[in-house]
Image (cartoon, rainbow, N blue to C red):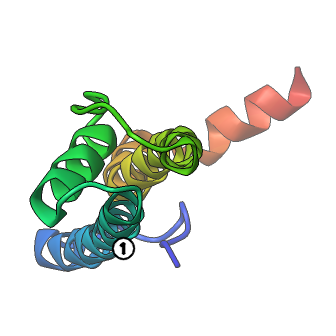
Amino acid sequence: MYEHRSDPLLPRRVFWRRFGRHFFWSLLVVGAALCVGTVGYHASGFTWINAFLNASMLLGGMGPVGDIPTDGGKLFASFYALFAGLVFIAVSGILLAPILHRLMHALHLDDEAEIEDVKKQ
């Protein structure tokens, strides 16, 4: 998917296109997670707007807003909180991957003499 270390650094326009694709997938993942959370909280007894608020706050890392009236809702909120944490980590990885790859590619020393010296040691 990414260029090899021996390939030249991508032009900025191509890099921003790659980052745009990663951003699109991140939005898709967050949107799907937000839909799951909103529907789950609504099924737990919240109004649509309060369900959306709770799902958004959990995905943003802030925590739930209102009291959950049912035991099933409390179970859903527990599992959704764990799920939201994993979504946060996954989306961070999706967004940082092209940036970190470009940085590592730009800083990589491709001097054959230095590579041979390291192999000899």
Q: Give the image quarter of residue 107.
A: top left
Can you identify the residue that label 1 sits on?
32
Q: Residue 121 vs residue 84: left or right?
A: right
- Residue shown at the point (39%, 54%) measured from the top left: 91
The residue positioned farthest toward the top in the image shown: 121
The residue positioned farthest toward the right in the image shown: 120
Three-letter code for the amino acid on which mark 1 is drawn? Ala
- Asked if one can make out residue 9 in the rendered structure from this viewpoint, the answer is no
Q: Residue 11 vs residue 34: left or right?
A: left
Q: Give the image quarter of residue 28.
A: bottom left
- Label 1's element? helix
How many numbered badges does the structure rendering display? 1
Residue 72: image location, x then y, percent: 57, 50
Q: Give the image quarter of residue 11.
A: bottom left
Residue 44: image location, x then y, percent: 41, 56
- Where is 72 relative to 74, above or below? below
- Residue shown at the point (14%, 68%) measured from the top left: 12
Q: Nearer the viewer, residue 1 or 35?
A: 35
Q: Nearer the viewer, residue 66 or 119?
A: 66
- Asked if one can make out residue 90 in the rendered structure from this viewpoint, the answer is yes
Residue 101: image location, x then y, percent: 42, 53
- Where is 79 relative to 49, above or below? above
Residue 4: image location, x then y, percent: 55, 68
Q: Quadrant of the C terminus?
A: top right
Q: Residues within 10 Å of mark 1 (few under 14, many from 20)?
A: few
Q: Nearer the viewer, residue 103 or 112?
A: 103
- Residue shown at the point (40%, 66%) measured from the top left: 43
Q: Nearer the viewer, residue 9 or 54?
A: 54
- Residue shown at the point (24%, 68%) measured from the top left: 23
